[in-house]
Amino acid sequence: MKIGIDIRNIGKKRTGDEVVFFNLTKNLAQIDAQNEYFLYTDLTDPVVLKEITERLEIQDKRNFQIISLKTKNRFTWNFWTLQKYLRAHPVDVYLTQYITPFFVPTKIKILTIIHDISFKVYAKYIKFSDLFFLKILMPLSFRRADKIIGVSDFTAQEILKYYNVAEDKVTWIHNAVGDNFLAEISETQVADVKKKYNLPEKFILYVGTLQPRKNLPTLIEAYAKLPTETQAAIKLVLAGGRGHNYDTNIDKTIAKHSLQNNVFLPGFISEDDKPGIFKSSLLFCNPSFYEGFGITVLEAMTLGMPVIASDIPPHREVAGDSIVFFNPERSADLTDRLNNVINDTVMHANLAQKELIQAKNFLWKNTVRKLLEIFNNLND
């Protein structure tokens, strides 16, 4: 088969969705020498393209080719530049995320990966302009797609719940962690990361986007209720870029409790540095109201770090009973869990053991094999 993949997010610091497409592509290159792959991007800088090629480890893969399609912006790329290219150079299967190209030959089978539908469930947290396009384009994309792929069973069920699509059109594949989380992490790496991002000695960690649905003000409120001596010894680190849809209540809650010297916002953390920042922390917390999968929870579990996470279905799907859960509507509940994990070293060891066992259920190679099955079934 000729398989096209939209890799525009690779190299753009897009956190979760970049991680997914990077690891899908890299692992496809490792296990599939039969099919031809065409990787489409809007990046044109030869240096950056070379770096992506090397990171994906496809420089010696004859069946993998990066195709750079220059355009004015992301809208014209998807709705004109790419579609024009695919009409002239058709593939059998095209894999993208969310918005599909509409005007390509129907013989091209289109798959779209959906990381979550938070824009549907928590519309109040989405910019009006973004919501306007999503409300119009998502139903059209689902209609054009030959297969809709959630990153969890939960997300697949959410798609069926909120959109009028046939059940046999929707499936799911699980995310996993990158190879950098499976390698040994030295004390030197940990020290280098702490110095690079100016991190405190001991801290509770959150990593991800800083959007309203991530419920970070509740984490700050919970931290503010910890004993004074605990706050003096242990800080709070919220790692993520202050980019699109930043939750301004983060700053307000920090100011409300005068925690400017206790809460650190180091900004975006590169994928290479993520294992080091996890290992630098005392524990990891994800207080999110809504996730499609919860990749950072799995990343922390893979490293055996104590994890406290909101009690929502995707976190249960990923973690089973291996982590500590709390009610995301109640900051006091989170405070209790933080106190328990911070002060109980036996709990630390028990959590690490259970998490490491559970994390072994998620491997990119298994995910990619399932994805190849989906490709093959579309072309039977």
Image (spheres, grey):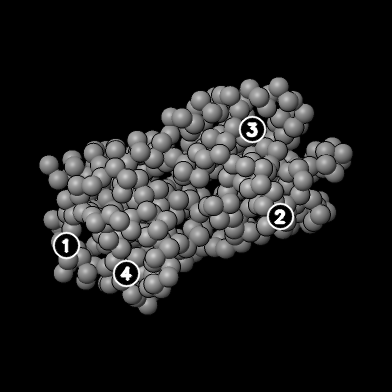
Q: Nearer the viewer, mark 2 or mark 3?
A: 2
- For label 1, the SS is loop
The image position of residue 224, as x and y in percent, is 79, 44
Using residue 279 as the reference point, say whether residue 332 is left or right of it: right
Q: Position of residue 243 (x, y in %)?
A: 57, 63
As helix, strand or loop, the secondary structure at mark 2 comes to helix
Can I make out residue 297 in this image? no
Q: Secondary structure at mark 3?
A: loop
Instruction: Give the spatial CA distance, label 2 vs label 1.
Output: 49 Å
Amino acid tagged 3: Pro
N-term-proximal mark, 1 vs 3: 1
Q: Where does label 2 land, which residue?
A: 195
Q: Dots 1 and 3: beta carbons under 8 Å?
A: no
Residue 185, x across and y down, in percent = 59, 41
Mark found first going from the N terminus, 4 or 2: 4
Identify the residue at image location x=45%, y=62%.
Answer: 11
Separation of disc 4 and disc 2 at Cα?
Answer: 36 Å
The label nearer to you, 2 versus 1, is 2
The residue mark sitting in front, 4 or 3, is 4
Check the image and name the residue furthest to the right: 229
Report whether 375 appears left or right of 120: left
How packed mark 4 is, by other alpha carbons closer than 10 Å (few <14, some 14-19, many 20 or more), is some
Which residue sits furthest bottom? 72
- For label 4, the SS is strand
State the mark number for residue 90: 1
Classify 237 as above or below 348: below
Instruction: Work out how far the residue at label 4 is from the one at label 3, CA to CA, in angstroms.
Output: 42 Å
- Label of residue 68 in the image: 4
Q: Quadrant of residue 250?
A: bottom right
Question: How far is mark 2 from mark 3, CA to CA?
Answer: 23 Å
